[in-house]
Amino acid sequence: MSTHDENAPRAGFAAMEEGTAEDWGVIASQFGPFAKKLPERVLDHLRLLDGDFGGFPIDRLQHSLQTATRAHRDGRDEEYVVMALLHDIGDTLGSYNHPDIAAAILKPFISEENHWIVANHGIFQGYYFFHLIGADRDMREQFRDHPYFGACEEFCAKYDQAAFSADYKSEPLSFFEPMVRRVLSAPRRSIYADADRAAE
């Protein structure tokens, strides 16, 4: 069921080249409120991983919670913990490129280093199993000279590949929800960030 107001003002153009400042004022006035609900949409999508095992010992939501919990208990900052929580959110829509989905969602809100980690964790995670499925476990070596190689290697070693224990007591999603809302409410890198601020 749609929550959009069909009676809200709308731009009058049929092609963008016909748009006026008034049209774009209407659009900008609705962008801000819509963008502010991004954390809720992301959390709703994360919940789709609940009960999705895909053959793993625990479902994908529990893996995400466990990864984030391990990072939190290790003293990582809030941004890193949110990155850990959302690193596999692309599993539902990006079966062949899930890191790209998470990286695209998080890019406006996290540091360059954390973005690089989430964008490349799939290849680095492969170190632990690619050789068992006929692939090259050392695929990550193509990035050996990258300044964030060690950070991504550490994320996978300490948090991601270790987060499949059915006995580990993770924090519930509700524990992380305020963190997600805080991190996803402050875009740093976005061509639309100025429009968002202007609409406030």
Image (cartoon, rainbow, N blue to C red):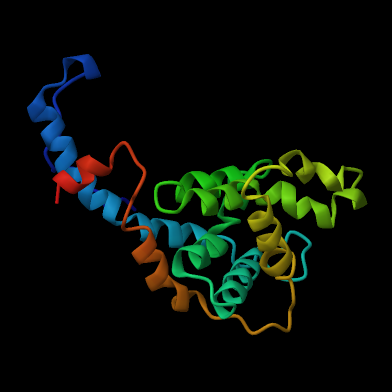
As drawn, 4 above or below 37: above
126 or 144, nearer to the observer: 144
Q: In which image quadrant can residue 152 be found?
A: bottom right
Q: In which image quadrant can residue 17 be found?
A: top left
* Place of residue 33 in the rendered image (x, y in percent of width and height, measured from the top left): 21, 52
* Place of residue 185 in the rendered image (x, y in percent of width and height, measured from the top left): 31, 58
As drawn, 89 above or below 66: above
As drawn, 187 above or below 192: below
Report the label total.
0
Q: Is residue 47 visible?
A: no
Q: Residue at x 46, y 73 (%)?
A: 176
Q: Is residue 123 visible?
A: yes
Question: Hey, which residue is sitting farthest left in the picture?
Answer: 22
5 or 131, nearer to the observer: 131
Q: In which image quadrant can residue 48 be found?
A: bottom right
76 or 53, nearer to the observer: 76
Side (left or right) of 120 relative to 47: right
Q: Residue at x 70, y 49 (%)?
A: 122
Q: Residue at x 56, y 55 (%)?
A: 89
* Place of residue 70 in the rendered image (x, y in percent of width and height, measured from the top left): 62, 75
Side (left or right) of 44 relative to 59: left
Q: Residue at x 84, y 46 (%)?
A: 138
* Place of residue 186 in the rendered image (x, y in percent of width and height, measured from the top left): 31, 56
